[in-house]
Image: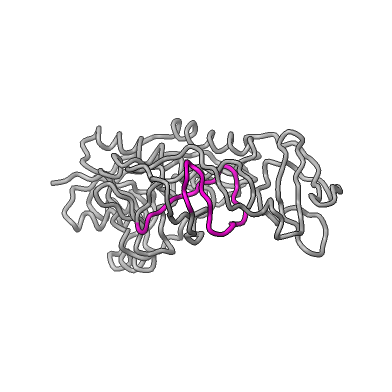
Amino acid sequence: MTKVYVGMSGGVDSSLTAALLVEQGYEVTGVYMKNWTQDLPGLKCPWADDLADAKRVAVQLGIDFEVFDFENEYKQKVVEYMIDEYKLGRTPNPDIMCNQEVKFRLFLDAALAHGADMIATGHYARVQDGILQLASDANKDQTYFLYRVTKEALDKTLFPLGEYSKPEVRKMAEERNLYTAAKKDSQGICFVGQIGIRDFLRQYVDPEPGDIIDKQTGKKLGRHDGAIFYTLGQRHGLDIGGGLPYYVVGKDMASGEVYVTRDLNDDSLWRKTIELSSVHWIGREAPDGRYQVRIRHRAPLVGAELKAGTLVLDEPQRAVTAGQSIVVYDGEECLGGGIVGFAPSR
């Protein structure tokens, strides 16, 4: 009998994942990954409640249950990475780094060392012969977050939810009377729940106030409490008067100046040519040619030409920000992608 270790976060997706695998005849062990337990001012970390919920479901299913403690590695590989990127003025995605370094590396290695043949998670994606494919539910597809996983890891991974929509998952969980069937999805930063990125960063950096400058006129419009908190295209949180809204179009981390405009057609807000760094291909390296790309989670796929590590989009896209990920698709297949570098606008 194939032994599968299921990452159980205490949510409905991973709970149903475990239930489906039990029904399919696998020998299932549930595993809670203890990645983050730190409380923040005004917010209690939900890890203990999530662990308790995962345990309850494991008892319901009659499966073994373990806790893998990755907290030190998680802090180094995910949290510190995110903080360092923000300090440099970029906009990272910690969920992608978590998948690369923790769920499909540390968890996989630990599960195999404990005797597992495969691992499984509640991601909405499909995998076949090490090829990552879009989930059936385009609205819920999570391949964007998985593009840095290796083919070797995918060869040993099951995604039982890849054929279902979220409403179907809820219904199936209710039909099985799973304890987490009605539990709300987690929001916000992947490891601290509801707290916003600004409040989180304040715990680890000492931001320097600076001027907010109108890009067109050079006029000082106001003050901000830290350039690190602002990202390209942002319009909220500027507090610089009424009338038409201002949008962030750039920042200088050395001087602390944040540049804004009311012109939605400003070249700084739009990007057609994108230089990729830290490129990762899941299996075969994508040859130069035409593909579809996703510039952020839930963004529509757009056509693009790939040539020597540079993407030229069919149409300029708004607020493509250094540090975020661009993921490349060939039809249903997620090929991989890279991190946005700085490139000429339009």
Q: In the picture provided, is 23 more to the left or to the right than 39?
A: left
Which residue in the rendered view is the most extreme toward the left?
A: 1
> Does residue 266 show up magenta in the picture?
no
Q: Position of residue 238 (x, y in %)?
A: 75, 53
Question: What's the residue at 48%, 52% (across, down)?
Answer: 305
Way the structure is coloured: one colour
Q: How many marks?
A: 0
Q: Nearer the viewer, residue 332 or 211?
A: 332
Instruction: From the top left corner, tell me how far across and down residue 27 is, in percent.
Output: 18, 47
Residue nearer the viewer, 291 or 73: 291
Residue at 67% x, 53% y is 269
Question: Quadrant of residue 111 in the image?
Answer: top left
Q: Which residues are magenta?
A: 305-332
> Residue 257, percent across and down?
77, 41
Q: Looking at the picture, how far across and down is residue 93, in whole percent?
A: 52, 45
Relative horizontal placement of residue 86, taking residue 313 as reference (left or right): right
The answer to if 306 sits in the magenta stretch is yes
Please, what is the dominant secondary structure of the magenta stretch?
strand
Q: Residue at x 84, y 47 (%)?
A: 218
Q: Name the residue at 46% across, 48% down.
A: 306
| 155 sits left or right of 210 in the view | left
In the image, 147 versus 84, the foreground residue is 147
